[in-house]
Image (cartoon, grey):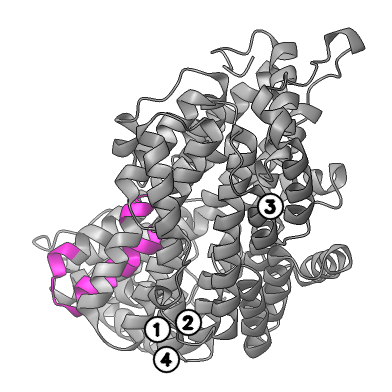
Amino acid sequence: ILSASGDFSNLREIKKQLLLIAGLTRERGLLHSSKWSAELAFSLPALPLVELQPPPPMTEEDAQDMDAYTLAKAYFDVKEYDRAAHFLHGCNSKKAYFLYMYSRYLSGEKKKDDETVDSLGPLEKGQVKNEALRELRVELSKKHQARELDGFGLYLYGVVLRKLDLVKEAIDVFVEATHVLPLHWGAWLELCNLITDKEMLKFLSLPDTWMKEFFLAHIYTELQLIEEALQKYQNLIDVGFSKSSYIVSQIAVAYHNIRDIDKALSIFNELRKQDPYRIENMDTFSNLLYVRSMKSELSYLAHNLCEIDKYRVETCCVIGNYYSLRSQHEKAALYFQRALKLNPRYLGAWTLMGHEYMEMKNTSAAIQAYRHAIEVNKRDYRAWYGLGQTYEILKMPFYCLYYYRRAHQLRPNDSRMLVALGECYEKLNQLVEAKKCYWRAYAVGDVEKMALVKLAKLHEQLTESEQAAQCYIKYIQDIYTCGEIVEHLEESTAFRYLAQYYFKCKLWDEASTCAQKCCAFNDTREEGKALLRQILQLRNQGETPSAEMPAPFFLPASLSANNTPTRRVSPLNLSSVTP
């Protein structure tokens, strides 16, 4: 029954497997895996009494270790790990041996975390170590060579190797663990954290089981392969997991990763109705509310989570985001620090704390925080991007370039990374590269609508007036087609340039249209008026457009229709105009 065969044709069998593994992981103190399996089992229809699985039979060794195991498990549950290990010493059954080793591991981790919390200053990761790891590795590797480790033992061996930074060996051991015990979600999740790109994924020989589908969907989300991830989750919903809160929350996270904010928000709101006391992923939800500046909703979420559990990492992050939105950056940083005291390996808090230090102009602390984030997870593009921004403030463009490049590799279709890269190249005077970046940012869908303006200004610098004019025209068309009423700071710049460009080409109609547009903005009003006077003068002198000056395609007809210089049109009235 523990084999977890390939397909989803028999959901009852899957339900039995999930209930069984939830019990097995619980007996071994693997609480997160147990919770995951139980949540997934809960989303499937209930089983009748006849079909319920009896607990697995006990061996002679299990019976001998029963007393020691029962006592030790009670100590383990109240977090007295050394005491649990002491009473399990010398036990031979697989379950008791696992608990013995796991207690020693957790004891070391707890001591390490306590040390770290006492000095959360500028302390490098290397200075506090889990002292138990070396011994555990020696003992587990002997057992491993003698092929005496079961699926849980292999999982623990993998964790120890990962903690010792032996990534390659750890991956091999986790893959072996998924073959031996495919139902244990913890082993799959560890693999997710170690795989850094799609290439690595190709070379893994994973067992052909239904658990693999959950793993692939999860890793695709992590690797920003969002379309593939959403496809996998949709398939899982179609085969019968539609009630799983885990899958729903993962879909919301996936939409958050591709910046489809409205979709993500509506899914999170739905999830909160179904599972009102859920705390996982609520930090992601708060990021979305933050981006949308939804103060009252964020305030409600923060108060609500505070009532449920004040000392959860996610709660601290939500409260941190709330203070950050209210521009109380010191308070926000304080809550992110509290989150890290609760869990120093919590990625989001390091990155967010970096952002707060940036707001407070404390660049060295920001760099420190971002570096910690990258140590925890090399795939966190926000931390790489944050490092780029800090070095930009410190006027170190070569460093900047390196970090923005890393961010861009992780998010190849995110225009913000491309614009940042372009600015970097511009500072380093590599204008051809800069042009490529801006053009690509426009091509992938420019979020901040700045790429074209930057490209136009580059063309201006290089006296490529025709290309500059084309960029400005595209920019203006873009603004008027998107239909959103936003304050575009560069609109006046675009109209000023185009007015002067058409004026040089002696295209009076187009020039006067653009000059009138200039009159609608404070910073270009005087120039616009002066240009209109000049055009009027030259028109009266009867100058015709010169044939040898080629003009690019003209402004949209609907924009040039308004030719009366007296009626000044505010840029907002144009939001309905579609070129």
The residue that mark 1 highlights is: 528
Disc 2 crowd rating (10 Å Cα; few below 14, some 14-19, many 20+) is many
Left or right of 45, for residue 509? left
Viewer-proximal residue, 411 or 186?
186
513 over 141 or under it: above or below: below
Identify the mark nearer the N-term, 4 or 3.
3
Q: Identity of the amino acid at label 1?
A: Gly
Q: Position of residue 63 (x, y in %)?
A: 73, 29
Q: How far apart in space, not on screen, are marks 2 and 1 (Cα)?
A: 5 Å
The residue that mark 3 highlights is: 87
Q: Which residues fall within the magenta stretch?
A: 409-433
Identify the mark nearer the N-term, 2 or 1.
2
Q: How far apart in space, not on screen, are marks 3 and 2 (Cα)?
A: 85 Å
10 over 227 or under it: above or below: above
Q: Position of residue 300 (x, y in %)?
A: 85, 67
Viewer-proximal residue, 342 or 8?
342
Disc 4 crowd rating (10 Å Cα; few below 14, some 14-19, many 20+) is some
Queried whether the magenta region covers residue 410, the answer comes back as yes
Q: How far apart in space, not on screen, are marks 1 and 4 (Cα)?
A: 5 Å
Say which mark, if any, is on residue 519. 2
- Asked if residue 346 can be seen in this view, the reply is no
> Is mark 3 in CB contact (under 8 Å) with mark 2?
no
